[in-house]
Image (cartoon, rainbow, N blue to C red):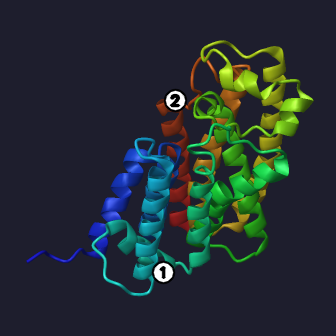
Amino acid sequence: MTQALTLDEAYAACCAIAKREAKNFYYAFIALPAARKNAICAIYAFMRKADDLADDESLPHQERRRQLDAWLSDWRAVCQGAPTSDPVFFAVRDATQRFAIPLTLLDELVAGTTMDLKSAGSAAPDTYATFADLYGYCYLVASVVGLVCIRIFGYKDSAAEKLAEETGIAFQLTNILRDVAEDAARKRVYLPLEDLAAHNVPLQALLQRYPAAPPTLAERALLAAIAERAEQYYQSAKKLLPLIDRESRPALWVLVTIYHALLVRIRRANYDVFSRRASVPLVHKLAILAVGMMRMAVVRLFR
């Protein structure tokens, strides 16, 4: 007889996925109290599974869509009370109930992953005409994550919701800058076409450029403009921090600081995101985490 999965085992499985895959996010998770950390890891594991299904290039895009739809159908059944042996579903169901996370937000998370499937199997590249169009994509794949996270972090002022949305935009614009070369190789150009035109960078130049070639002056100017836009959205993160429950602030500070450090490294490399992939060194992440842990210790000492 198979032993039933316990909630602790389900959360442990999610935390293992986050530790293995989350990169920048996991360092922030460590600075959270246990129950909130478990919930964040569960949401991350849910998001990671949806991304993996959407991005599995070993499968035709129709099969990816079929598997994603089947997985989402299974999740919705679990939400209605169906038993499950899937540790991610088990943990996420508990997290959504424990922290009053609207299920519509998780639907939006999955909708964001399907946007990356729209050009799969097509000869045409995946592009966004305007920043407004790109904002819609960033909202689904990043801002919604922020809206879920602040419910786990805790907040009382509704102004936190718009600030969390805009913080997600800052993070996603940073990801887009870091991944320009990798995305172009997959026929995905997230830099708005209106921005390409404004900086005289032809779309085909990005799609067909020699991967390791340094950026041209026009490309540097284009990437600098995107970086400046991201910097403006990071101001929302600063405003969000004091609106979050005190015991969660160190974790949010760690996350924002690591992501902003990535943007700083891209700038210091003079926007050469083609010859090497920008990243924050492990020693720098650990130093940021150490400060976050000290902040958490202070909060616990005086609560």
Residue to which mark 1 is pinned: 98
Q: Is residue 34 above or below residue 119?
A: below
Q: Which mark is residue 281?
A: 2
Which residue is at the front of the view, 166 or 302? Answer: 166
| Discs 1, 2 touching: Cβ within 8 Å | no
Total numbered badges shown on the rendered structure: 2
Residue positioned 63% across, 21% down in the render: 274
Q: Which quarter shows the C terminus?
A: bottom right
Q: Residue flagged by tag 2: what amino acid is it?
A: Pro
Q: Residue furthest bottom?
A: 81
Query: Amino acid type of disc 1?
Result: Arg
Q: Quadrant of residue 163?
A: bottom right
Q: Secondary structure at mark 2?
A: loop
Residue nearest the observer in this picture, 63 or 27? 63
Instruction: Judge whether residue 33 can be spotted in this image.
Output: no
Q: Give the image location of residue 140, x and y in percent.
A: 66, 59
Which element type, helix, strand or loop, lies under badge 1?
helix
Image quarter hosting the N terminus: bottom left
Q: For mark 1, does the 10 Å Cα neighbourhood hold few (<14), some (14 to 19), or many (20 or more) residues?
A: some
Counting from the top left corner in percent of width and height, residue 147 is at 65, 66
| Image position of 79 (left or right of 277) | left
Q: Which residue: 35% across, 84% down? A: 82
Residue 227 at what x, y percent from top left?
A: 78, 35
